[in-house]
């Protein structure tokens, strides 16, 4: 992409006395002038830029970046699907956006109702009895769930439980969270079909288990069809089943994690309910759980009695607070808007379309790329660039080349159990035309790998940096 304007830092655009905005002179009398020692000796070195220039500057920066409003974003697993503009309209209403978190509850009943009703919707969608909206990301939800599981065990004077089972296809945040919660990782090798081998679970299910953490469908996009049997084994050993709910967008209205035997899970609202991805912090990772774990949820939880909404702090067994204030309210409000906009039937169609889209790509790309688990997938498909690597172009080269076509790279080298992995998640929101364009580009790249692999090493050629 050629930029007419050379890239400059904001400070380099500064011209003395240029102004983007002129504020009226303050007519508020200072109660007491600032003490001399606290005053600036010189003006702050702020950029002086005209309104046009500053708007153009940030507009240019946003175009240098790839984002979901610009083009297809098939990055598997941590996918951004899209951010509906109606969500932005709703959360920019000053009644929501300008609400102070310390507003007394009698003055923010509407906001509490949004949180309460979102919690009820998430409980219905997952089949669970309890919910917290506090964790600010999926990974933080994982930590919340694990701390709840541990606290349950220690409150039963069961202090030897430290182990958490994960499959070798687990997302990187899973083992990291297990360590952060002071537990030990027991990693299981996946079976030849890409799913967890029930017998392997049986071997490690004993009185040292805090529980098992597993994504379903797993990170290969494959449904763990033995999940109920696995849940039974873990429960018999006294452990809990934690679902990494990043892939809930494959299950909406079709089944629930509760039915599979899970006890607690987080939801990545950026994947399933169209919110911007907070990347570890400014997002949301609500946690839902069974009744047995409900007392351990973080404080406070939003409750409703006689049509009055309030924060319930009186929860003696709670693990405490996981996030300042009450979670990222405006992210949560966006998720609520998406759920209401789709309704029950619409949410089921969301998952069905996500599954159809991934399978469409799986079928069309199988002639050009290896697919290690070729028979089925749900909402995402994992290809392998093994064939291309032998020709001299690796998954990294293919991912970089995709950028030249204005498409975000897929997730590569994950899950680690697939050689030269390229994980692609189209989501339900992409059109057939976009998917067809993607397939054409992937085929062209496969041809380039065959004919001139060195050309792919030097890609990208058209990105700004
Ligand atoms: C399978 C899986 N688990 C956990 C996470 C972590 O979620 P977050 O990035 O919101 O912390 C992700 C990323 O979306 C994921 O794909």
Image (tube, grey):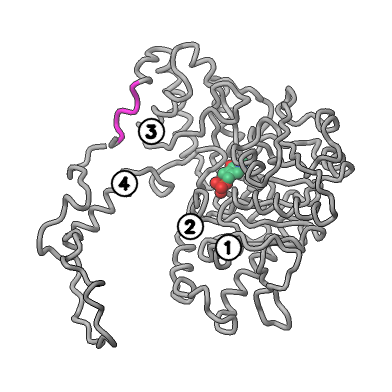
1 vs 3, front mark:
3
Mark 1 touching mark 2, by CB under 8 A?
A: yes
Q: Secondary structure at mark 1?
A: helix
The residue singled out by tag 1 in the image is 341
Which of disc 2 and disc 1 is earlier in sequence?
2
Majority SS type along the magenta span:
loop
Ranked by sequence position, the earlier of labels 3 and 4 is: 4
x and y percent of residue 237 in the render?
87, 41
Question: Ligand 1, what quadrant?
Answer: top right
Q: Secondary structure at mark 3?
A: helix
Residue 403, numbered label: 3
Query: Residue 379 at x, y = what percent?
Result: 62, 40
- Return the residue at label 2: 84
Q: Which residue is under mark 4?
A: 63
Residue lying furthest left: 16
The residue range painted magenta reads: 458-463
Check if mark 1's residue and mark 3's residue have beta carbons within 8 Å: no
Q: Check contact, mark 4 vs mark 2: CB within 8 A.
A: no
Judge left or right: residue 29 versus residue 74.
left
Local packing at callout 1 (Cα closer than 10 Å; few below 14, some 14-19, many 20+) is few
């Amino acid at each position: 992409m050629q930029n007419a304007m050379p890239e400059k830092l904001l400070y380099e655009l500064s011209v003395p006395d240029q102004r983007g905005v002129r504020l009226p002179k303050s007519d508020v009398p200072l109660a007491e002038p600032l003490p001399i020692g606290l005053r600036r000796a010189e003006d702050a070195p702020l950029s002086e830029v005209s309104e046009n220039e500053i708007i153009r500057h940030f507009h240019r920066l946003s175009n240098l970046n790839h984002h979901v409003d610009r083009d297809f974003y098939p990055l598997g697993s941590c996918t951004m699907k899209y951010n509906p503009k109606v969500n932005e309209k709703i959360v920019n209403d000053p009644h929501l956006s300008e609400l102070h978190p310390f507003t007394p509850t009698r003055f923010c009943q509407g906001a509490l109702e949004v949180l309460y009703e979102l919690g009820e919707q998430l409980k219905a969608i997952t089949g669970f009895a309890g919910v917290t909206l506090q964790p600010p990301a999926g990974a933080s939800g994982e930590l919340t769930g694990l701390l709840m599981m541990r606290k349950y065990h220690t409150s039963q004077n069961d202090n030897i439980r430290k182990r958490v089972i994960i499959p070798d296809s687990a997302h990187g945040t899973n083992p990291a969270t297990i360590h952060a919660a002071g537990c030990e990782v027991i990693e299981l090798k996946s079976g030849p079909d890409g799913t967890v081998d029930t017998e392997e679970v049986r071997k490690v299910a004993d009185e040292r288990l805090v529980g098992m953490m597993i994504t379903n469908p797993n990170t290969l996009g494959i449904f763990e069809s033995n999940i109920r049997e696995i849940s039974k084994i873990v429960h018999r050993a006294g452990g809990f089943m934690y679902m990494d709910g990043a892939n809930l967008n494959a299950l909406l209205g079709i089944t629930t994690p509760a039915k599979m035997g899970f006890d607690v899970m987080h939801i990545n609202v950026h994947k399933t309910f169209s919110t911007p991805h907070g990347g570890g912090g400014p997002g949301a990772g609500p946690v839902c759980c069974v009744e047995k774990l409900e007392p351990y949820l973080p404080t406070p939880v939003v409750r409703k009695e006689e049509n009055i909404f309030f924060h319930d702090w009186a929860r003696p067994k709670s693990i405490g607070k996981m996030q300042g204030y009450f979670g990222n309210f405006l992210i949560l409000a966006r998720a609520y808007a998406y759920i209401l906009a789709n309704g029950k039937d619409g949410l089921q169609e969301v998952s069905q379309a996500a599954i159809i889209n991934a399978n469409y790509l799986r079928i069309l790309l199988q002639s050009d790329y290896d697919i290690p688990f070729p028979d089925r997938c749900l909402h995402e498909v994992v290809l392998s660039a093994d064939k291309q690597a032998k020709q001299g172009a690796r998954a990294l080269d293919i991912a970089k080349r995709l950028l030249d076509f204005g498409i975000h790279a897929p997730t590569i080298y994950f899950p680690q159990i697939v050689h030269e992995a390229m994980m692609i998640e189209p989501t339900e929101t992409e059109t057939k035309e976009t998917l067809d364009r993607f397939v054409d580009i992937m085929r062209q790249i496969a041809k380039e790998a065959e004919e001139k692999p060195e050309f792919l090493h030097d890609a990208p050629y058209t990105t700004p940096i």
